[in-house]
Image (cartoon, rainbow, N blue to C red):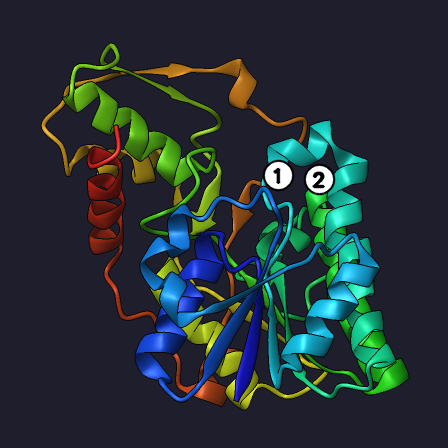
Amino acid sequence: MNVLITGITGFAGSHLAEHILARHPGVKVSGLVRWRSRMDNVLGILDKIDLHEGDLKDFVSLKKCLAAIRPDWIFHLAAQSFVPTSWRLPAETLAINTIGQVNLFEAVLDLKLDPKIQVAGSSEEYGHVNSDEVPMKETNPLRPLSPYAVSKVAQDMLGYQYHKSYGLRVVRTRGFNHTGPRRGEVFVTSTFAKQIAEIEKGKRPPVIRVGNLEAKRDFTDVRDMVRAYWLSLEKGVEGDVYNLGTGKAITMRELLDRLLGLSKVKVKVELDPARLRPSDVPILEPDCTKFVKLTGWKPEIPFDTTLRDLLDYWRERV
């Protein structure tokens, strides 16, 4: 079997590649890269994967890559995935996430390929959630509150539309927050962990800069999340959509407290206005019953283990 991972050099993509290589040794793993892609996350597996230079916004290069790889499965993970950046670069976010996916689908159709395709959506698609809608099921209304969230809704709906219109074998997932080693430093768990690691080494004053600590999010270890990605194509129903997460949201304040509990530093917490968003989603907590019943998947890695591994990752790098 040939598997293509878009975004293979990113956080989730690199963990997915490692998971496939470890658990499914007969599978050939290929990935898309751009000339400016950072390779840090895949240095340890470069001799075990095939990388093809292509860009989601460049249809010609994308089609050439797909013609060379001819994948049986595609995990479409490449995206502009940072919500605050989408406020500054809304058009670029939509171009990468939405038009990029249209290019991918059209290249598949032009080449008359028939892969099963995972479209990696996001919990941010739900946006404004009423109190009586928690935990959210897949049938909950989508009320996106950021350009990023709008782009992911578009990806989600394009997956449904291309399945219905052209028979593309698309399975849509809405992954809730996931974290662990290699998480980008702009994301909340890594932002906190990196600051703590720097304080431990005396590289910054004992002050943690934070945004909204009252927001509640569901966190899954990325290594559990990529298992779910694999199962979404192994057992998922084509055309359907699945929530992926633990089903237990915590506040950013509790997240910070748990990270600090893994360290001996004493810190002062200060609000950083630059970390506040024009509009924020108060709570994202999923009902994942549908996916669990179908696949038997459940998170296996305790959250404190995830946080310890993340903190140790930054301790080695600061």
Counting from the top left corner in percent of width and height, residue 176 is at 51, 57
Nearer to me, 278 or 236: 236
Residue at 26% across, 53% down: 306
The residue tagged with tag 2: helix, strand or loop? loop
Q: Quadrant of residue 242?
A: bottom right
Counting from the top left corner in percent of width and height, residue 109 is at 84, 80
Q: CA distance from mark 2 to mark 1?
A: 7 Å
Q: Which corner quadrant holds the C terminus? A: top left
Nearer to me, 275 or 253: 275
154 up-or-down from 188: above or below: below
List the residue tagged with mark 1.
83
Residue at 68% across, 64% down: 140
CB within 8 Å, label 2 to label 1: yes
List the residue tagged with mark 2.
146
Q: Residues within 10 Å of mark 1 (few under 14, many from 20)?
A: many
The residue tagged with tag 1: helix, strand or loop? helix
